[in-house]
Image: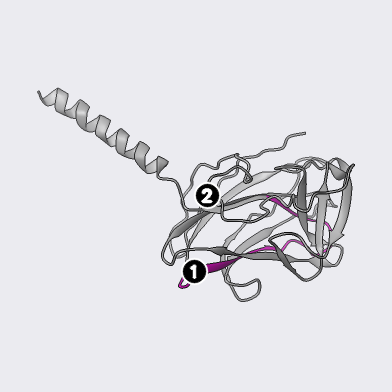
Amino acid sequence: MRRLSTLVVSAVVGSALVAAPVSAQSCQTMAGNLVANCSFENPGPSAGANYEFRNTLTGWNVDGGQFERWSNGFNGFTSRDGVAHLELDSNVGNTSIWQYINTVAGQTYTVNFSAAHRSLNGQFSQIQFLVGGHSNGNIVFTTPQITDANPGEYKWTDYQTSFVAGAGTQTKIVFRGIGPSNTYGDHIDNISVRVPEPTSLALVGLGLLGVAVRARRRVS
């Protein structure tokens, strides 16, 4: 089973789309991740492959129904990170999950998450990321329509976007299922929100420094 496809998308609210590398690192070990229960592991699932509804899930709130969680490879669908993930198109239709994270006004934050679909007669999955509210927030990013290459193949795709925090010390982050509301799709896992690392900028700086040194040597 293929588990990773690196479709990469990055966006900052109010600016152009820019491609950027996506890290395959687990959100649970990612330094600086602000998201609580980022891969839906807590509370732990029961033994064996299981599919369950929960009224509560540590760190998260849900609008439009209950949490629908798959764990321990239920139905042959292995989670992207850890042993559990959520389906946002639950048995009562599309849902939104949200939580508040601590942010600094004016600071840019990088968002990573993974999404997948399970086949149903040519249907698709699609997920939106919003800040500020599940119905009246700012839509930061919408995934393309996600389909499976082959029936029964569960293929995770990693996405990356970013946003600039508004006023206040907290930001409400929302993930909303917007595929066909047929109780079949919009799977999500491995969520992280953090201040972007300066590594890429440092590499660019080193590259420019190398060019300058080589140019100076040619002149001398």
Could you tell me which quadrant the N terminus lies in?
Answer: top right
The percent position of residue 5, horizontal first and vertical second, equals 65, 39
- Three-letter amino acid code of the residue under disc 1: Thr
Alpha carbon separation for disc pair 2 and 1: 16 Å
Find residue 179 and report its image quarter.
Answer: bottom right
- Does residue 211 lie above or below 159 as drawn? above
Q: Residue furthest left?
A: 220
The percent position of residue 26, horizontal first and vertical second, equals 63, 41
Q: Is residue 17 left or right of residue 1?
A: left
Find residue 30 and report its image quarter.
Answer: top right
Q: From this viewpoint, is residue 46 visible?
A: yes
Could you tell me which quadrant the C terminus lies in?
Answer: top left
In this orientation, which residue lies closer to the viewer: 155 or 56? 56
Residue shown at the point (89%, 43%) measured from the top left: 47
Q: Residues within 10 Å of mark 2 (few under 14, many from 20)?
A: few
Q: Is residue 212 left or right of residue 136?
A: left
In this orientation, which residue lies closer to the viewer: 112 or 104? 104
Magenta region includes residue 183:
yes
Q: Is residue 203 left or right of residue 4?
A: left
- Three-letter amino acid code of the residue under disc 2: Gly
In this orientation, which residue lies closer to the viewer: 5 or 148? 5
Q: Which residue is mark 2?
A: 32
Q: From this viewpoint, is residue 177 visible?
A: no
Range covered by the magenta-colored residues: 166-189
- Does residue 17 lie above or below 93 as drawn? above
Q: Which residue is mark 1?
A: 169
